[in-house]
Amino acid sequence: MSGMRPWILSEVNFGYVKEHQYEVAVLPLGATEPHNLHLPYGTDMYEGTAIGERICEVAHKQGAKVLLLPTMPYGTETNMNQFPLAMNVNPSTLFLLVTDLVQSLVESGIRKVVLLNSHGGNEFKPLLRELYGKTEAHLFLCNWFRVLSSDDYFQIFEHMDDHAGEMETSLIMACQGHLVDKKEDGTLNADQGAQRPMRFEALQEGWVGITRPWHLLTTNSGSGYPHASTAEKGEQLLEKLTERLAKFLVELSAAEIDASFPFEAG
């Protein structure tokens, strides 16, 4: 075998694929957008790729027939449109693209598909509802940034993160540290990640929602304090995510698709 990693589609060849059937496909879904002043535009893409590679490698080594697809680099950015080069794909367009990719997987004999979402602006639950009963694929949605409980989160981090704060900055420090912009004294070239307060109590409390225009919400697109970030915290996050998600992939790969799948048999 060559130096390819057989759980990564972009590295395998047709000779290998002809001899091996995959059970589960993982599709990371990212975005291209600003992340405060210090993180790269490709932050969500890098995060999805790093997490996807980790979880698929561990699952593969535990016997899962799992395949990582190339990360989607674009997502929905309609509320970021006042920032330059926030590359938008409308939800309807994104749904069509993912639907076509799912159909390609079905035609290749893969009927278990995990959407590994790495961008908060992507809302895929409506797509799962729309495709239910219309495709042979069983779709599973994982927003990796919501995997940890509050207790688990604060075992690692000091501050909540909404966008380019402590969690995301730590994760990029761990997987793409050379792309984190710092000043000469070693501190982050970033603002404080403060949010403009909402005017109405209902919005402040969260029981009424809006789509948040990011140029009004933030100063430089960052929402969350980034200055307590470390690569070590990012690695701890990767370890926790890998432990949970790789286990799920192993279980999913081994599971038989029967009449009650993914529920327990009656």
Image (tube, rainbow, N blue to C red):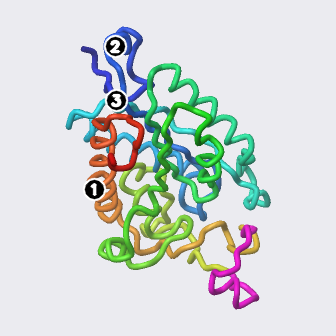
Distance from disc 2 to disc 3, alpha carbons, whole Å, reads: 11 Å
Q: Secondary structure at mark 2?
A: helix
Q: Residue at x 50, y 44 (%)?
A: 115
The disc labelled 2 sits on which kind of residue?
Tyr
As drawn, the label of residue 239 is 1
Q: Position of residue 265 (x, y in %)?
A: 32, 46
The residue singled out by tag 3 in the image is 7
Distance from disc 2 to disc 1, alpha carbons, whole Å, reads: 29 Å
- Quarter of image, res 254: top left
The residue singled out by tag 2 in the image is 16
* Viewport quadrant of the N terminus: top left
Distance from disc 1 to disc 3, alpha carbons, whole Å, reads: 19 Å
Query: In this image, 51 relative to 236: left or right?
Result: right
The span picked out in magenta is 196-213
Sequence order check: which comes first, mark 2 or mark 1? 2
State whether residue 149 is above or below residue 180. below
Q: Secondary structure at mark 3?
A: loop
Question: Which sits in the foreground, 128 or 13?
Answer: 128
User: Residue most toward the left?
Assistant: 62
